[in-house]
Amino acid sequence: MGVGVSGWRLARAVARTGQLGVVSGTALDLVLARRLQHGDPGGHLRRALAHFPVPEVAERVLARFFVPGGAGPGLPYRPVPRLGLRPHRARDELTVVANFAEVFLAREGHDGPIGVNYLEKIQMATPAAVYGAMLAGVDYVLMGAGIPSEIPRLLDALAAHRPAEISVTVAEAAAGDRHTVGVDPVALLGRTPGPLRRPRLLAIVSSHVLAAYLARSPETRPDGFVLESPTAGGHSAPPRGRMRLDPAGEPVYGPRDQADTGKVAALGLPFWLAGGYGTPEGLARARAAGAAGIQVGSAFALCRESGLDATLRRRLLARAAGGALVVRNDPHASPAGFPFKIADLSGTLSDPDVHADRPRLCDLGHLRTPYRKDDGTVGYRCPAEPVGTYVRKGRPAEETLGRRCLCNGLLAAIGLGQHRPDGYREPPLLTLGQDLGFLDGLPDDYSAADVVDHLLSAVARTP
């Protein structure tokens, strides 16, 4: 659950129960840089960075971003290098170190399994991010929002500290063009660290067809699948075929959008079900369908160890418990082009007035799309940037309608929103799954361990 909702505290709490705790790997460069500028309360990040295998790399990151005692109120955060195709040493160092720190802290003090989740859509961050997580000993890599066909090969190479790259989709690229982004571990670190263990890969998919495509070859085959339904929080796959909207403006899903669990089971790889399964009954249904278990997001997003801003978390929890919370599947909100779940809460970007008042800008750029310019060079655009800027980059203004800046909004949701001396503060954007039945049977203010105990009560009742 990105950005930072499933942070190291939550993943560690889940792993301590014996289940797989997963940290979000999305935009960890920004998360680390901003938390260091807050002064690193508790010293957790500095403790993690003290264990980075190449101290001088971690020291450069600290020198650039750490502010003892925290920056003063109202001061803007120092910018981080934006993602791009051109090599950028400082950007790669920050990405590697940030992913290392998050996984290191999640693994600290227990022997439970830890995973890290990435979006295939954010291709330009993937090689350096994955390598940082592997340096910290991550057990699983989970990847959705695309087709992670090149990730098995990436993991193989990085486990041996070999240079590795993946393809990057560039819009309007000429036929035969191939664009890549990669990382050379030895060149970046200046030495070869000790042996690495290759993590297992779980591909997050929405259809048995895609699962079969990935499983067809050893070069693309993951170690398992997460089958995600359209009710899951965050991004979801669009409906197959022509997009149709219901009277509320949400995508209409049909039988073609339901994954055939029998066909997935026949592939011989373990799979987990996600999206509306976060209850004891949901776990029982998943196991009856042949699944190894379930992936749970929303229940953990509202627990005490969640990375959500505490005030926002309590407001969401109160509205959900009272049956007043509405979660919409907005087909236009995300610059990534996938439908995105938005939890309606006043004062956030779900409010049309708040969205209208926010000045359009794209100053973080994790969801920017590379595109081929007329002169053959590569530019970057985002439908959440100023309309005139986007149009000058060759796209119609209609594509900007309703777009929210997810990068800034999701950072604000975990208390790291940008603020400026003139008093401007980035408003938060909140996401949850659309099935809120997971609250039944949980205490009013619950922990991650409470969620696990509640879910596993179905297993205890099974003869």
Image (cartoon, rainbow, N blue to C red):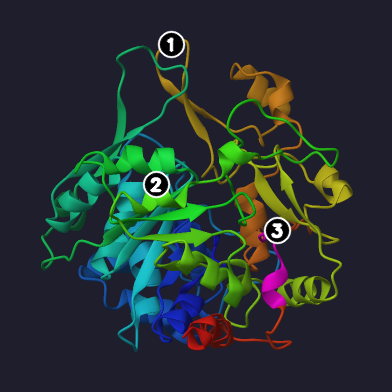
Image: magenta residue range: 431-439
Q: Where's residue 416, x and y in %?
A: 62, 65
Give the spatial CA distance, label 3 vs label 1.
45 Å
Label 1 Cα neighbours within 10 Å, binned few <14 / some 14-19 / many ≥20: few
Picture layout, residue 419 above or below residue 361: below
Q: In this figure, which residue is indicated by the disc labeled 3?
A: 434
Q: In this figure, which residue is indicated by the disc labeled 2?
A: 263
Q: Nearer the viewer, mark 2 or mark 1?
A: 2
Give the spatial CA distance, label 2 vs label 3.
26 Å
- Magenta stretch encompasses residue 437: yes
| Of residues 351 and 386, the one drawn nearer to the viewer in this rendering | 351
Q: Earlier in the sequence, mark 2 or mark 1?
A: 2
Q: Earlier in the sequence, mark 2 or mark 3?
A: 2
- Is residue 282 left or right of 266 when viewed as pictured? right
Q: In this figure, which residue is indicated by the disc labeled 1?
A: 375
**Can residue 176 be seen at all in this image of the molecule?**
yes
Farthest front residue?
463
- Is residue 349 left or right of 366 when viewed as pictured? right
Q: Where's residue 420, x and y in %?
A: 71, 57
Residue at 35% in and 12% down: 175
| Of residues 191 and 327, the one drawn nearer to the viewer in this rendering | 327
Residue at 68% in and 51% down: 341
Q: Earlier in the sequence, mark 3 or mark 1?
A: 1
Total tally of numbered discs in the picture: 3
Q: Amino acid at mark 1?
A: Asp
Q: Nearer the viewer, mark 2 or mark 3?
A: 2
Q: Quadrant of residue 194?
A: bottom left
Q: Where's residue 33, x and y in %?
A: 48, 63
| Of residues 369 and 16, the one drawn nearer to the viewer in this rendering | 16
Check disc 3 and report its element: helix, strand or loop: loop
